[in-house]
Amino acid sequence: MNNLLKLTITAAALMFSLTAFAQQSEEERVEALLQQMTLQEKIGQLNQLSVGGFDPNAAGMMRAGMVGSILNECNPKVLNRYQKAAVEESRLGIPLIISRDVIHGFKTMFPIPLGLAATFDPELVEQGARVAAVEATASGIRWTFSPMLDIARDPRWGRIAEGSGEDTYLDAQMGVAMVKGYQGESIDNTSMAACVKHFVAYGAAEGGRDYNSTGVSERTLRNVYLPPFEACVKAGAMTLMTSFNDNDGIPSTGNGFLVNDVLRGEWGFDGFVVSDWASIYEMVNHGFAEDNKRAGELAFNAGVDMDMMSYSYISHMEELINEGKVSMETLDNAVRNILRIKVRLGLFENPYIDESKVESTFYSAEALEAARKSAVESAVLLTNNGVLPLNKSKVKTVLVTGPMADAPHDQLGTWTFDGDPAHTVTPLKAIRDLYGKDVKVIYEPGLTFTREFNENGIAKAVKAAKKADVILAFMGEEAIMSGEAHCLTDITLKGDQRKMIEALHATGKPVVVNIMAGRPLELDFEIAHSDAILYSFHPGTMGGPAITQLIFGDETPSGKTPITFPKNVGQIPIYYNHNMTGRPYNGTETMLYDIPLRAGQTSLGNTSYWLDTTFEPEFPFGYGLTYTTFEYSEPSIEMTEYGAGDVIHACVTLKNTGKSEATEVVQLYVRDMVGSVTRPVKELKGFQRVTVAPGESVTVRFELPVQDLAFYGIDMVKKVEPGKFRLWIAGDSASGKPVEFEVK
Ligand code: NOJ
């Protein structure tokens, strides 16, 4: 047989087997593969390897079927070579699932997830995740470690930047939007498997210190921390990652109750579970396992299918099987879970990428526009004495100053592996490009980075300010100050930033402060020394145009705080949906310096508050101003009594009482007045973005199924408990008048 004929026959055989394979159902394909696999090949699928560049040893492992997935490489050429080793040079040709942390964009960077949550716009967030998937999959990344669903109520915790804030409902909405965006409506080559993480309660780290222990009860897990995961699993999230923390003494990576019982048993999850980086091995550090082998046994039997970088499964699984510590059935099920997702993603049909098309998918006009729009909607106007929007006909000269005015890398925020700062549009560039013909722009940074101490720099900025009509001060945190392992105990602006704001304010010129940060910061000082504060979180590639268009009034603010802003770090944890104490604060207590000297046992009211700060936060959850004012009517509901199967129809009239069109995030909250366990004082149950013209009124309607009021009560069964409820429809979590209803 000549070579050409041989090749034709082989190709035809391959085509035939691929076609036959493709015609089988997902489960048939998984079973067919599983039947052919040796023990070593099965163990190989459980192994995830970090690679950097082309490593012949790693490729050798792929040829030998010892690697199921890789992370940390995104050079398309290198990825194709690795994939070839797995697909064409290994015995069974099982493709790798190639992963990366694509957290808020791949090349085109979107606002950090906390900023995205401030949009209260799931559709836009889904669109952003789709952009990320299109860009990343073009490079060969078919699996991202996002969304991070960790509820976080402690701004000291650096990873607060990576999640959607403090609220379960908002978190679930944002998570589902990201899952849909990454995976796409139907699976094709641009589908990137989502990974919901970190399972679970990782955001409740004691002291806001990353990786720290948590102590969340099962009831609070079920009522607060787990629902976003369940919602994303129901939305089809293909994978899940366990967390680093031990909760109530059990490291999540070894917690069978969470993975086997809740995730798979109760929710029917059929994707696969990956450990966090070395979190299997770290159970040795936790003092939960004596060595890496025992850690592997605990993790695997707890339901963790894939080992990210502990080398535990690849080194010890064969022994564990031979010793009977892990059953063959457990192993087969884990391999099934992984193969199922590889089949579902279409990796067998399309393992490679077209290297010639990679670059052209990056930074498209649509992607940049989606990023700009997301940055516009994520900015929260916290204070404004009327200086904003700037009046272009009156303002002739602006001073652009501050360490974040021209910080192309830092405005991208945490988890920016691939976004190229050369594509970032900073506020300075945007002001010059968009408004340079209308106003004179003076640039004097004052401080060159956010932690800098530089009195000279400040003096120069102050001098320049004297020539300007308005000062635009871009302050905040460098990207490095939030994110994984980047926690703080002091959440005020660092370096000389406060000094600089004070000095600028002392010039008597209006000071507009824009803050780009990875967390809510303490802002008492900034509020007292400025005329307006626009909070942008880290806004991503297109932050510059978004912020300047907001400042100049070509866009209107609509973002709302996705998290409570504390007055000071001592109030933490402070969140709107806390339970009620037996001695609630009533607003009349004496403060520290009002207590008479030598007061002895003077009664201070004995309610729940602090002597040295107010009970209220600086800004409540759901808060944000815009360039108009809105008036809410009292909400109305059509009945006062409902059955468990009913839907509550609630509505409110929203009037734009100002002079410009604007979008309001209308929020619906409820309180269950008496429960078998104490219930939160308010819980968000719905929201809508509504645009209203000046002088116009609109009726905003909500449908709330009574079943959405269910929770895990004293008997740990999820149900609606009959009784009285209150319902608010308002512009934030601290305002509005409630209506009452009863569930019979
Ligand atoms: C550790 C982080 O906790 C996790 O979120 C991330 O996905 C992995 N490292 C992989 O980079």
Image (cartoon, helix red, strand yellow):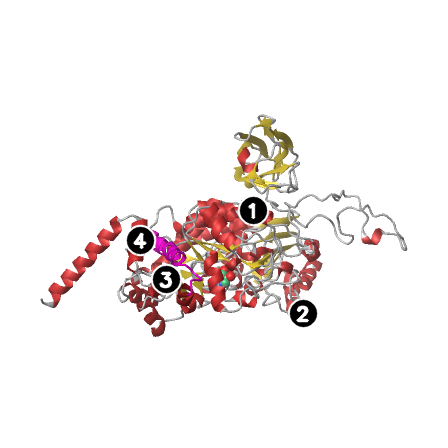
Q: Which residues are magenta?
A: 323-344
Does the rendering let one see residue 66?
Answer: yes
Specify whether tag 4 is near ligand 1 (CB below 8 Å): no
**Does the residue at mark 2 contact the one at mark 4 (Cβ under 8 Å)?**
no
Q: Mark 2 highlights which residue?
A: 455
SS type, badge 2: helix
Image disc number at residue 31: 4
Amino acid on which disc 1 is placed: Arg
Q: Nearer the viewer, mark 1 or mark 2?
A: 1
Q: Is residue 331 magenta?
A: yes
CA–CA distance between discs 2 and 4? 69 Å
CA–CA distance between discs 3 and 1? 32 Å
Q: Residues within 10 Å of mark 3 (few under 14, many from 20)?
A: many
Image coordinates for residue 322, horizontal then vertical, percent: 39, 65
Q: Nearer the viewer, mark 1 or mark 4?
A: 4
**Residue drawn 9% across and 66% down?**
1
Does the rendering let one see residue 148?
Answer: no
Image coordinates for residue 33, horizontal then vertical, percent: 29, 57
Quadrant of the image for the C terminus?
top right
Amino acid on which disc 4 is placed: Glu
CA–CA distance between discs 1 and 4? 34 Å
Q: Is residue 388 found left or right of 417 in the rendered image?
A: right
SS type, badge 3: helix
CA–CA distance between discs 4 and 3? 14 Å
Residue 583 versus residue 615: which sits nearer the camera? 583
Q: Mark 1 highlights which residue?
A: 222
Residue 99 versus residue 407: which sits nearer the camera? 99
Relative vertical location of residue 165 with respect to residue 727 in this rendering, above or below = below
